[in-house]
Image (tube, rainbow, N blue to C red):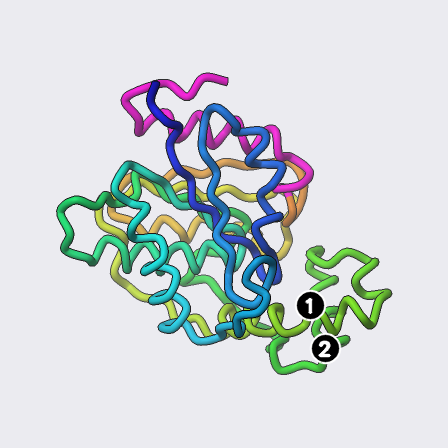
Amino acid sequence: MARPLKLFCFPFAGGSVWTFRELAEKLAGRVEVHPVELPGRGRRRTEPCISAWPSLIQKLSDELRPHTTAPYALLGYSLGALIALEIARELVARPEASLHDPIAFFACASRGPSMLEHAELMHRMEDKAMFDALRKLGGIPDQVLASPELIALSAPAMRADLTLYETYVPRSKPLNGIPLYAYYGCNDTSVGNSYQAWAHETDATFECRAFEGGHMFLDSEVTELANALASDLACHMNRPLIA
């Protein structure tokens, strides 16, 4: 029996592998979810956080490359969509004939790179102000803001991630031959209609899917998200992903 397709998932700013725990449960038996842990959190909390794009992409792509000998897909959520995009570019640029390119790319809850804009640079704020600003976007639980200890614990990884997000420079060259899907929340004011700009990031097919909820539809609509992923991935496989 063939193993399920691997889906490498990159979290939003401050997220960890636990971000995708429920999604992995919903996709069990259909798609094999592989959350990617960034340095400085979770099981990699003893490693220094990385806030420079070249260093992060080189490190993560080197780690993923041995796992791309069979078909796989990439998913990024919010900041993770930008990380996944740069990982995809790095992976498809390598010459090894035994390795695969992604069969599909999923950008979730993210503006297209060409539509990024920053009214204020949160990574330059003090810790409390940084988290207050993030809360307005709907991504920070109240219990974190109420706890100075949690803020202090979370701040280094969050600051590194926001530095990445707020210093990202879009590139004009699209992914070659990789179908791209933009998933967005209907009430996500931080993204609005800018998800459509992801169409410029591939020269292959581009499709959009709307979900109820706001920026964190990963939590509120996880069953619908899992089913959408299984359905869209099945279009690029030679076998069905049975629900």
Q: Which mark is residue 102?
A: none
Whether residue 92 is situated above or below residue 152 in the rendered picture = above
Residue 223 magenta-drawn?
yes
Q: Quadrant of residue 73?
A: top left
Quarter location, residue 20: top right
Q: Could you tell me which quadrant the N terminus lies in?
A: top left
Q: Is residue 179 magenta?
A: no
The reply to whether discs 2 and 1 touch (Cβ–Cβ < 8 Å) is: no
Label 2: how many Cα within 10 Å (few below 14, some 14–19, many 20+): some
In this view, the residue in front, 135 or 96, is 96
From the viewer's perspective, is 170 left or right of 146? left
Residue 127's disc number: 2
The amino acid sitting under disc 1 is: Ser
At horizontal 55% and vertical 49% (from top left) the residue drawn is: 109
Image height check: is 160 above or below 186?
below
Q: Is residue 217 left or right of residue 180?
A: right
Q: Main secondary structure of the magenta part?
A: helix
Lower sequence index among marks 2 and 1: 2
Viewer-nearest residue: 25 or 171: 25
Kind of residue at disc 2: Asp
Within 10 Å of the Cα at label 1, are there few (<14), some (14-19), or many (20+) other Cα atoms? some
Residue at screen point 50% across, 18% down = 243
Q: Please tell me whether mark 2 or mark 1 is closer to you in this view.
A: 1
Is 170 in front, or is 71?
A: 71
User: To which residue does mark 1 refer?
Assistant: 154
Residue 232 in picture, x, y percent from top left: 41, 29
Q: Nearer the viewer, residue 149 or 103?
A: 149
Magenta residues (range):
217-243
Where is residue 131 drawn, in percent x and y?
A: 73, 69
Does dot 2 land on a helix, a strand or a loop? helix
Q: Is residue 178 visible?
A: yes
Asked whether residue 194 appears in the rendered view, the answer is no
